[in-house]
Amino acid sequence: MTFIWPTFLWCLLCVPLLVLSYWLLLRRRKKHAVRYAGLSIIKEAMGPSQRFRRHIPPLLFLMAFSVMLLAIARPAALITLPSQYETVILAIDVSGSMRANDVAPTRIAAAQAAVRGFVEQQPRNTRVGVVTFAGTAALTQPPTENRQDILDAIDRIQLQRATAIGSGILVSLKAIFPDVEFNLNSTDPRPAARDGPGSRALGDSPKDKRPDFKPVQPGSYMSAAIILLTDGQTTTGPDPVESSMMAAERGVRVFTVGIGTIEGEVVAGEGWSMHVRLDEDSLKKIANATGAEYFYAGTADDLSKVYKMLNSKLTLERKETEITALFAAAAACLALLSAMLSMLWFNRLL
């Protein structure tokens, strides 16, 4: 547990002062009891349980006061809470290498099955969109709550040539922020985004950036997330790591999923063959830059487990949350209990 205002913890020094004051008050009462014989007789008539019970309300009040002082310091703790993601973009690699069968029955078939299961487990109010990318990227299904439309878009996937992971990220961002203009499917390794007049290409000097656009903390945008799946490495289009920086500037997390063999696979087609290898380094950099995570799936079962894990991460998220209200409520309950016991046992407040 941490405290947002830790300097206020010095207020806890008041607690021993209260204990000292209570002890001095008891000594004063003891002197009065000795001075007046009647009070001394009453005290002797009280049993040990009665004498102990009279300290319980003050003790509860002291605890309430201590918890209240802790609340002033604004405590925070890691708590698992329901996520507020309203939009999830599924970016799927549809390059020719996805027909490889090292992940049974094929990489693309295993990916489609895992993505279908993920979609079916999403809350009904979550909008899901589908982006496919090969040599270029396209939004094949705009974000929608209609699960059948999403599943149909997944079933319509057709494989193409080349791999443009950066374009897949930019098209996914365009689906989340339709009012922002991105340089989609560009072969320039520096993707450009334009939020209006005075915008800049990524990598230009900060002075060219539109003044009313302010980058936010990576991973801080809790209304949308991107899940990117690929089995290879970029062969065309903008640099994927540079593209992910644009997602990071807007706080959008890009969870990356690598499928296939890390050492590489030779994929053959009609009169052609090529060696494809999973670029884990780039996928890890994309995830780290945006405050997300990278997952590797070497088999169809692994891929299914990854998407189940992603589902739990998007619906339940563990993050540091201020719990001042809980401390304040606990202090109020202890103070109320102290007053009730004092009234019940002694017909007075403390």
Image (cartoon, helix red, strand yellow):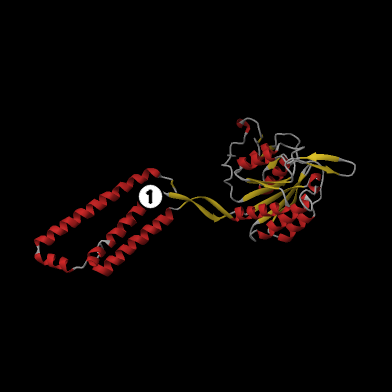
Q: Residue at x 22, y 64 (%)?
A: 51
Q: Quadrant of the C terminus?
A: bottom left
Q: Nearer the viewer, residue 234 or 197?
A: 234
x, y percentage for residue 70? 37, 50
Q: Residue at x 69, y 60 (%)?
A: 120
x, y percentage for residue 156? 80, 54
Determine if residue 240 is in view.
Answer: yes
Number of marks in picture: 1
Residue where numbered disc 1 is placed: 72
Q: Nearer the viewer, residue 138 or 292?
A: 292
Q: Residue at x 43, y 45 (%)?
A: 4
Task: Classify residue 221 as left or right of residue 5.
Answer: right
Give the secondary structure at mark 1: helix
Q: Nearer the viewer, residue 251 or 44?
A: 44
Q: Nearer the viewer, residue 285 or 213?
A: 285
Amino acid type assigned to the residue bearing label 1 in the image: Ile
The part of the image, by quadrant, that contains residue 218 is top right
Determine if residue 193 is in view.
Answer: no
Task: Classify residue 217 as left or right of residue 146.
Answer: left
The part of the image, by quadrant, that contains residue 347 is bottom left
